[in-house]
Image: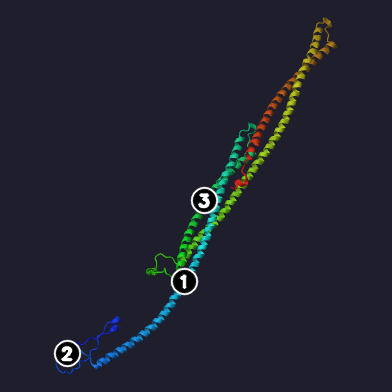
């Protein structure tokens, strides 16, 4: 062996090293004086343990091993208990999470169904409003025909002759009809604008619901996929940052309120659409009834006016016939008076000649005797008769002149009534047969 002095092996606790526990220095034992057998054995004795050290070391190892075994058993018991408890807690937590995901899926499905129902209702409401908008536009276009008819009637009636160019009941009803049509056109335009605005609002509400529905559809798919994950699923993996709180997330109350607010807006628009539909139907019904009622009033006024003109024309024609008869009779009367006056010429010449001849009697024979007086009376009578006949002839001629004036006035008035009757009956009333029907005025 080497002649170097061997140093004692330092004490080392392997368990403490394994558990990374700071190593404690071994207790310092008092130095025991060693017997020396001489310098030849000094190096050998310093490198060996003593029997007490050997027994002590074995005892220490045994104690440490027993303590380690007991500690291991305790750790194993605790590990089994912890494993059992954590396994149960994990399974319970996972089951609770799965149940909550299922509840969440039901909530999402409920609100998504509500959104889908109101989306379909808004879509149906919008379609109905589009149909009503088309009806309003058709009804507005249909009012152009009665307006043109009324304007044409008024224009035609301005061509009536002077005596018949009066502001009668027909003209008043036509003016009422024109004003009514203008008011109806303004009302239909205003109602159409309201329908267009409501269609826009319905589409905006529908778009909001569709966005919410789309978000819930994606959320439902994500939660459904997450709910289907199990401990044996091959597509799961660790996401360390997924459990941290995300910024700008909503809470369940805000989530529910958001959808409820969207649905509330949709319900309001649905109610507004329903009210507007009833309003439009009422407007179309009222405007159609008003137009048809006014059309009936105008037609009735035309009919009454035509009856009046026919009666007036018939009376004028009867009177014209009488006047013509009187003109003929008066003309014959004038001829008779002229003949009567002419027939008085011969007797007057005879009487005057007799008086002249008797005025040639001489001296006392020129006597106012009975013949003289008779002849003078005869002349006076004939002169008076001729004067009376001439006066009667003048009166007859004046009467004939008046009859001629009446005839011309009657003929002119008959022609006027004929023309006015042609305008009202053949022009205006025939044109009014093209008045739109109830279905056309209602926008169908």
Q: Which residue is mark 2?
A: 43
Secondary structure beneath disc 3? helix
Name the residue furthest left: 39
Name the residue furthest front: 1
* Mark seen at residue 336: none
Q: Which residue is mark 3?
A: 196
- Relative to the observer, which residue lies in front, 177 or 11? 11
Residue 219 sits above or below residue 30 on the image? above
* Cα distance in 3D space between marks 1 and 2: 76 Å
Tag 2 or tag 1, which sits nearer the N-term? 2
Q: Is residue 89 left or right of residue 177?
A: left
- Relative to the observer, which residue lies in front, 132 or 298? 132
* Cα distance in 3D space between marks 3 and 1: 48 Å
Can residue 388 be seen here? The reply is no
* Cα distance in 3D space between marks 3 and 2: 116 Å
Q: Residue at x 67, y 32 (%)?
A: 418
Can residue 390 be seen here? The reply is yes
Question: Residues at badges 3 and 1 in contact (C-beta under 8 Å)?
Answer: no
Residue 12 sits above or below residue 380 on the image? below
Indicate the position of residue 414 as horizontal and vertical percent values: 68, 30
Q: Nearer the viewer, mark 3 or mark 1?
A: 1
Q: Nearer the viewer, mark 3 or mark 2?
A: 2
Q: Is residue 180 left or right of residue 61?
A: right
Q: Which residue is mark 1?
A: 98
Q: How many marks?
A: 3
């Amino acid at each position: 062996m080497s002649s170097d002095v061997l140093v004692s092996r330092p004490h080392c606790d392997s368990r403490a090293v394994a558990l990374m526990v700071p190593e404690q220095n071994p207790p310092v034992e008092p130095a025991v004086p060693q017997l020396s057998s001489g310098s030849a054995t000094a190096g050998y004795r310093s490198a060996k343990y003593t029997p007490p050290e050997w027994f002590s070391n074995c005892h220490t190892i045994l104690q440490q091993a027993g303590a380690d075994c007991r500690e291991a058993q305790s750790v194993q018991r605790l590990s089994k208990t912890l494993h059992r408890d954590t396994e149960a807690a994990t399974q319970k937590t996972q089951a609770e999470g799965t149940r909550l995901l299922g509840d969440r899926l039901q909530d999402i499905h409920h609100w998504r169904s509500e959104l889908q129902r109101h989306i379909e209702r808004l879509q149906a409401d919008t379609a109905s409003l589009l149909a009503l908008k088309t009806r309003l536009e058709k009804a507005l276009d249909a009012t152009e025909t009665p307006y043109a008819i009324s304007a044409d009637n008024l224009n035609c009636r301005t061509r009536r002759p002077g005596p018949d160019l009066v502001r009668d009941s027909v003209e008043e009803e036509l003016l009422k009809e024109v004003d009514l049509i203008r008011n109806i056109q303004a009302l239909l335009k205003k109602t159409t604008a309201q329908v267009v605005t409501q269609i826009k609002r319905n589409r905006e509400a529908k778009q909001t619901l569709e966005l919410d529905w789309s978000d819930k559809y994606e959320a439902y798919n994500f939660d459904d996929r997450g709910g289907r994950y199990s401990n044996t699923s091959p597509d799961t993996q660790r996401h360390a940052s997924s459990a941290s709180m995300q910024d700008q997330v909503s809470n369940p109350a805000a989530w529910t309120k958001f959808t409820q607010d969207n649905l509330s807006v949709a319900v309001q628009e649905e109610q507004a659409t329903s009210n507007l539909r009833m309003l439009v139907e009422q407007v179309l019904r009222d405007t159609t009834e008003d137009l048809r009622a006014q059309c009936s009033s105008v037609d009735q006024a035309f009919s009454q006016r035509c009856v009046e003109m026919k009666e007036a024309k018939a009376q004028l024609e009867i009177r014209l016939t009488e006047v013509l008869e009187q003109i003929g009779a008066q003309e014959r009367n004038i001829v008779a008076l002229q003949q009567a006056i002419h027939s008085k010429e011969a007797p007057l010449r005879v009487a005057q000649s007799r008086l002249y001849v008797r005025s040639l009697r001489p001296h006392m024979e020129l006597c106012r005797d009975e013949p003289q007086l008779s002849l003078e009376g005869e002349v006076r009578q004939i002169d008076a008769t001729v004067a009376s006949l001439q006066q009667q002839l003048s009166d007859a001629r004046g009467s004939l002149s008046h009859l001629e004036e009446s005839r011309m006035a009657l003929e002119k008035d008959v022609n006027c009534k004929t023309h006015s009757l042609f305008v009202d009956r053949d022009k205006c009333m025939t044109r009014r047969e093209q008045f739109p029907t109830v279905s056309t005025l209602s926008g169908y």
